[in-house]
Amino acid sequence: MDIYDVILSRRTIRRFKQKHIKLELLRKIINAARVAPSAANLQPLEYIVANKKELCDRIFETLGWAGYIKPKWSPAKNERPTAYIIILVRKDISKYYKWDEGLSAENIMLTAESLNIGTCMILNVNREELRKILDIPDSFIISSVIALGYKAEISVIEDIKDSVKYWRDEEEVLHVPKRRLDDIMHINGF
């Protein structure tokens, strides 16, 4: 797949097959994150890769899933991620780390997509509990968690109508409203 096709095919996935992701693929994904642009090349980000089932189960309990889907929803036990990448920030290195994180996270998710691995970036995290579970030093900010696994669901884009809220249809397909290109693109001025 060329990069444009990878970008267009990447969707947030919240249901995963229970198939182990090889460590060599996770290393490849982190390597793509490592080479992402970094403001002033300060490189404040580090990563924890979790792929042991027992540890993944503990991490899962610290996460909030799919806030728009009601009633409260999270993947069933047989649909949970099989790996996580926790993005950490070394404190006091760069005030621009949020941009660095966005660029790094996108590299993670696009590389995963190119390997047919689904991802879900999660910001709703019980950071203090996760810090305890992973023994993360206080000198790091826990920025986000990216759940990974082989895809067990379909997620599709549709034109936004009345709401930005994603939803599942009766076939359990996840629909994600996006603004139309012509509604957001301004040429040579607003």
Image: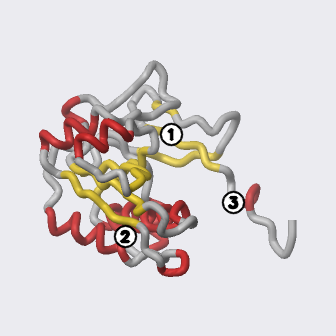
Task: Out of 61 and 129, give the one closest to the viewer.
Answer: 129
Describe residue 47's horizontal placement relative to residue 158 as left or right: left
At a point 38% along the width and 41% down the height, the residue shown is 127
Residue 118 visible in the picture: no
Q: Is residue 184 left or right of residue 136?
A: right
Determine contact: label 2, label 3, CB under 8 Å: no
Q: Is residue 8 left or right of residue 130?
A: right
In front: mark 2 or mark 1?
A: 2
Judging by the rendered image, the residue that carries numbered circle 1 is 175
Which residue is at the front of the view, 157 or 31?
31
Which residue is disc 3 drawn over?
A: 181
Q: Which residue occupies the foreground of this view, 143 or 76?
A: 143
Image coordinates for residue 128, horizontal then vertical, percent = 36, 38
Three-letter amino acid code at disc 1? His
Amino acid identity at mark 3: Leu
**SS type, badge 1:** strand
Separation of marks 1 and 3 at Cα, in angstroms? 18 Å
Q: Position of residue 80 (x, y in %)?
A: 25, 38
What residue did someone put label 2 on? 33
- Circle nearer the N terminus (2, 1): 2
Q: Which residue extends farthest bottom?
A: 41
Against 56, residue 108 (above or below) is below
Colouring used for the render? secondary structure
Which picture quadrant has residue 87?
A: bottom left
* Mark with earlier residue (2, 3): 2
